[in-house]
Image (tube, grey):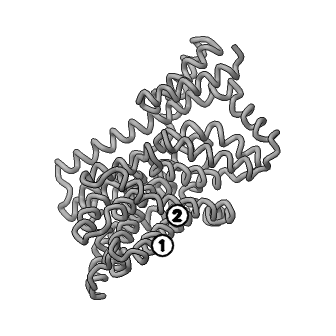
Amino acid sequence: MTDFSIGLLGIGAMFVLLILRMPVGMAMLAVGFFGTWMLNGFRSANALMVTEAFSHVSNYNLTVIPLFILMGNIASVAGFSRGLYEAAFAWVGRAPGGLASASVLGCAAFSAVSGSSVATAVTIGKVALPEMARFNYAPGLATGAVAAGGTLGFLIPPSTGFVIYAILTEQSIGQLFMSGILPGLLLTALFIATVTIISLRNPEAGPRGAYIPFSEKMAAGLRAAPLLGVIIISIGGIYLGVFTPVEAAGIGAGLVLIMALFTGKLNWSTGSKAVGDTVRTTAMLFLIIIGAAVLNPFLSMTQLPARLGEAMTTMGLGPYGVLFLIVVAYLILGMFMDGLAMLVVTVPIFYPIMMQMGFDPIWFGVVAVIMIEMGMITPPVGMNVFVVKGIARDVPMSTIFKGVLPFWFAMAVCLFLIVIFPQIALVIPQAMF
């Protein structure tokens, strides 16, 4: 059996393990370890696993993961997310579909704290969905707005998706964070436009909220100002070069912790829950990183990425034709795999091809993340759809999937614009560095 055949066998085995619900990190670790054993022997496989696991877990830059996750968890258990949602509703609630638009804005703001799509959908969904039900919003619009808005957590910095992409491709975490700002704002605007169009076509689906005086709008904004200030300090500090992403994570987590203690919203029970959730999520992400670190050398030894790149090049499709094939592959994989699994499985294969085609690595990171976001609301898996279903138990799954469909097309428009105008993703990181 040739090395290339062993590589194909390994990829097939990994998909089988994922279908059998083995954790993503363990599936990659198993395939990488046993594949290297078949190619180079047990001693080489064991040395690879030990050295790669230690070198990646001890990577100082990965400290951003637990710190940003802790920041989001403290903000969630302290109830700061409700302040973000109430401020958004005060300012846009009067517009058609105002509650749904406020949910999208709340998701965008909380994404800049949590860095997790699932955490964003759960946190904002628990606040927004009961309110939209009280105002008789169409279940599809309400759940679709929250499920789609939650995906912003994977794009708007600090994004765990960008951190993992940076580790897999050895790119700058700071540049990737900055590259997600304008696409994140663009996608937020497209989601709000989608809500507005749906509500204008069917006013009963998204009725306008009550009139709120300007003084109450300002009061709601002031209540959300401290957390918004933490976001501006963290992300703005990275942009201005005042501190690194790791330092920004530490400062952000420390400020949110001080706010929660000062307002009396953090006690032993909520603090323990925040720390426990942080440890569990960090362990899961680090296992994925270790698994990818062991899998990638195995794939390189089999020459699978290089052979696949050569095959795509010889087809004569050109750079954008190859990009189209990769987009189609992401769409298909999104029907069956969760976001992180897609990221760590595909980037080691697609990244060398994109570099061979002359695309910018930071730009491709944004494209890959948006494609993975689309997978989060694509049936039959759609991780965020299942998360929202857990909150809105009385809404049928088919209704939620129909509700997210217009937002899926909004994501497609965003992706198209970033492909046509790459500077949307690159202007800020290029200005920084």
Q: Earlier in the sequence, mark 2 or mark 1?
A: 1
Is residue 246 shown above or below 231?
above
Amino acid found under the numbered disc labelled 1: Ala
Q: How busy is the neighbourhood of tag 1: few (under 14 within 10 Å), some, or many (20 plus)?
A: some
Residue 259: which disc?
none
Coordinates of residue 128 in the picture (x, y in percent): 29, 64
Coordinates of residue 233 in the picture (x, y in percent): 43, 66
Q: Is residue 348 visible?
A: yes
**Which image quarter holds the N terminus?**
top right
Nearest the viewer among 336 and 273 is 336
Q: Residue at x 65, y 45 (%)?
A: 326
Q: Residue at x 50, y 22 (%)?
A: 30
**Which image quarter holds the C terminus?**
bottom right
Q: How busy is the neighbourhood of tag 2: few (under 14 within 10 Å), some, or many (20 plus)?
A: many
Q: Which residue has dot 2 on it?
A: 410
Element assignment for label 1? helix
Is residue 375 shown above or below 223?
above
Is residue 309 shown above or below 192?
above
Nearest the viewer among 423 and 319 is 319
Residue 193: which disc?
1
Q: Is residue 80 visible?
A: no
Q: Residue at x 23, y 63 (%)?
A: 130
Element assignment for label 2? helix
Coordinates of residue 425 in the picture (x, y in percent): 61, 62
Q: Residue at x 24, y 61 (%)?
A: 79
- The span from disc 2 to disc 1 (Cα, nearest Å) is 9 Å
Amino acid found under the numbered disc labelled 2: Ala
Nearest the viewer among 250 and 167 is 167
Given contact means CB atoms under 8 Å apart, are the residues at marks 2 and 1 in contact?
A: yes
Nearest the viewer among 211 and 97 is 97
| Image position of 371 (left or right of 401) | right
Coordinates of residue 284 in the picture (x, y in percent): 40, 36
